[in-house]
């Protein structure tokens, strides 16, 4: 029976999900089976947002009954929203697994608390230097690594990097916190933690190792050498579609739980985690929670970043321009569905070699996942931070097709659609709320182009931190420029129809 709401003023704040109300939840709601009081911190997570709580935190929730030494301390390096939401809930929240019209709820208890770094940096550094903490995971978004997306190297001119390298500075960036904590652990004789990025970056472990090592070297060459020699950066491939939570989601969860959850997470049944098995300080048995432990993540990661994320970004920009609100809306449009299937089959799959993988089956499973009507995954959300996403999602695939002398018309249309979107005006002439660290540069490019597609393409292709060497390839430039010209002239829906499955 649901916990009774206070029988006072009906306008009073609703009863919240918490350790006290957990036992009274409806019987059909799964919940932690372990004693949370006996769980100790073994992991710090930087960037505690929706994805972490629907993916890594769920895997750890599955493992704590067998090994309670791996509780998670979450940290936000930016806002206090998560702490404000989960603090009064004792770190508890609902995981809502949705498939079309069905929703299954589970309460997750693996997050022991949430720190707000800007409010109390030393408290986060204390958690990061706690000897019991042997793993630090991250989902700080692609832009959170202060790197050059085209090269994967530290952007040494990034304002956060410049600020964090000032001696004695209070860190602002994830990299700054990692290096300060590692320096303190070295000085205290505490073994380092493993750094486990769970963001959609290519070769994310090697990329973050390069960035962190360079930052440490700039701070102190001896520290840089120590990080390079002593710190493990296992790569991961992470996959679960987790849209941003809406008020309608909160209302649904409250109606089912009988108590309010300030920040449930909405996701799909599918989840995959492939992890490089490189944890010198020890790790939980991730494999007992369904993760795949491997020596080399690369084949799995490339397949996922190119087929899922490359298709996601392409349908996000083209779908948004065609007026589609969500991924499911895009895929309900037969012309778009045929286009995405052909994009994967004809242009992406031929670039992949994944031992043991059934690529046609993987494609079909992705299309079914994209069609899930239970997920209100906005094209606008996926369109965010395109400058940080395009290299690993579309440009690497194009570079491979160019090297093989193969066409890439649908991929080029995806890049052109990003340019049209990033220029900030949609097909109705309305402004687009473009979210991207390079937004100011985009506005300069758009202003200079004055509506001319060829000049707009040339301006965007000049962004070396996005396009790198590919930006100088004549065939790539001409193909994308022609695609943008046709897109502006005919519109996204028409261009997709013409390039749909032939
Ligand atoms: P979210 O918006 O819920 O959380 C993002 C987190 O990153 C927040 O804690 C935010 O404060 C932090 N953050 C943002 N910019 C930052 C910066 N410059 N420095 C430090 N922290 C920063 O987003 P969500 O859904 O959790 O996704 C986060 C990342 O997880 C994605 O960018 C992607 O790399 C990865 N991911 C997301 C999936 C999804 O479907 N949402 C699926 C697979 C991977
Ligand atoms: C999406 C990803 O927002 C985006 O960029 O493409 O977050 C996507 O949902 C995940 O990678 C799925 O695993």
Image (tube, rainbow, N blue to C red):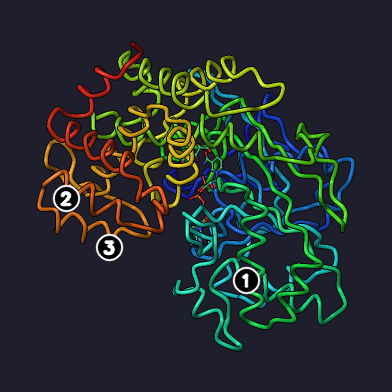
Within the image, what quadrant is residue 270 found in?
top right
Q: Nearer the viewer, mark 3 or mark 1?
A: 1
In what quadrant of the picture does the N terminus appear? top right
Nearest to the observer: residue 171 or residue 149: 149
**SS at mark 3?**
helix
Nearest to the observer: residue 174 or residue 149: 149
Tell me which residue sits at (44%, 43%) in the image: 10
Residue on which the image places disc 1: 214
Tell me which residue sits at (81%, 67%) in the image: 230
**SS at mark 2?**
helix
Between the C-alphas of marks 2 and 1, the distance is 36 Å
Mark 2 packing: few (<14 Cα in 10 Å), some, or many (20+)? some
Question: Which of the two labelled residues, at mark 3 and mark 1, occupies the earlier sequence position?
Answer: 1
Determine whether, in the image, residue 51 is placed left or right of residue 333: right
Residue on which the image places disc 2: 455
Mark 3 packing: few (<14 Cα in 10 Å), some, or many (20+)? few
Question: Which of the two labelled residues, at mark 2 and mark 1, occupies the earlier sequence position?
Answer: 1
209 in relation to 432, above or below: below
Expressed as whole percent of the image width and height from the top left, the position of residue 201 reads: 56, 48
Q: Nearer the viewer, mark 2 or mark 1?
A: 2
**SS at mark 1?**
helix
């Amino acid at each position: 029976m649901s916990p009774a709401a206070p029988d006072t003023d009906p306008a009073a704040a609703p009863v919240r999900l918490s350790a006290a109300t957990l036992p009274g939840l409806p019987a059909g709601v799964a919940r932690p089976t372990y004693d949370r009081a006996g769980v100790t911190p073994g992991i710090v997570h930087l960037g505690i947002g929706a994805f972490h709580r629907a993916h890594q935190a769920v895997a750890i929730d599955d493992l704590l009954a067998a090994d309670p030494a791996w509780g998670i301390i979450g940290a936000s390096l930016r806002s206090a929203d998560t702490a404000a939401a989960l603090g009064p809930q004792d770190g508890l929240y609902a995981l809502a697994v949705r498939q079309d019209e069905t929703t299954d709820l589970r309460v997750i208890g693996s997050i022991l608390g949430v720190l707000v770094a800007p409010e109390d940096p030393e408290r986060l550094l204390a958690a990061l230097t706690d000897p019991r903490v042997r793993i630090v995971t991250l989902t700080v978004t692609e832009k959170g690594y202060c790197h050059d997306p085209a090269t994967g190297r530290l952007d040494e001119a990034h304002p956060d990097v410049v600020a964090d390298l000032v001696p004695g500075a209070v860190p602002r960036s994830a990299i700054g916190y990692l290096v300060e904590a590692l320096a303190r652990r070295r000085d205290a004789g505490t073994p380092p933690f493993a750094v486990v990025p769970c963001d959609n970056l290519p070769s994310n472990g090697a990329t973050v190792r390069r960035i962190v090592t360079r930052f440490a070297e700039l701070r102190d060459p001896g520290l840089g050498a120590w990080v390079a020699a002593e710190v493990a950066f296992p790569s991961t491939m992470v996959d679960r579609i987790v849209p941003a939570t809406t008020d309608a989601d909160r209302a649904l969860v409250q109606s089912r739980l009988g108590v309010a959850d300030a920040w449930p997470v909405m996701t799909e049944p599918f989840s995959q985690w492939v992890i490089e098995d490189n944890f010198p300080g020890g790790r939980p048995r991730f494999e007992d929670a369904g993760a795949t432990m491997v020596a080399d993540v690369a084949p799995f990661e490339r397949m996922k970043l190119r087929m899922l994320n490359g298709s996601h970004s392409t349908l996000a920009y083209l779908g948004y321009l065609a007026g589609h609100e969500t991924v499911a809306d895009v895929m309900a449009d037969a012309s778009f569905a045929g286009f995405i299937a052909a994009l994967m089959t004809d242009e992406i799959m031929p670039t992949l070699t994944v031992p043991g993988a059934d690529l046609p089956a993987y494609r079909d499973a992705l299309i079914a996942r994209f069609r899930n009507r239970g997920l209100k995954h906005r094209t606008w959300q996926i369109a965010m931070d395109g400058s940080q996403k395009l290299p690993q999602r579309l440009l690497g695939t194009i570079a491979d097709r160019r090297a093989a002398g193969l066409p890439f018309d649908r991929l080029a249309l995806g890049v052109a659609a990003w340019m049209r979107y990033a220029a900030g005006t949609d097909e109705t002439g309305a402004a687009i709320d473009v979210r991207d660290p390079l937004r100011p540069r985009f506005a300069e490019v758009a202003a200079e182009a004055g509506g001319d597609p060829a000049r707009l393409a040339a301006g965007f292709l000049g962004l070396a931190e996005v396009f790198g060497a590919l930006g100088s390839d004549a065939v790539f430039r001409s193909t994308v420029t022609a695609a943008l010209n046709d897109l502006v002239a005919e519109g996204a829906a028409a261009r997709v129809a013409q390039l749909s499955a032939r």
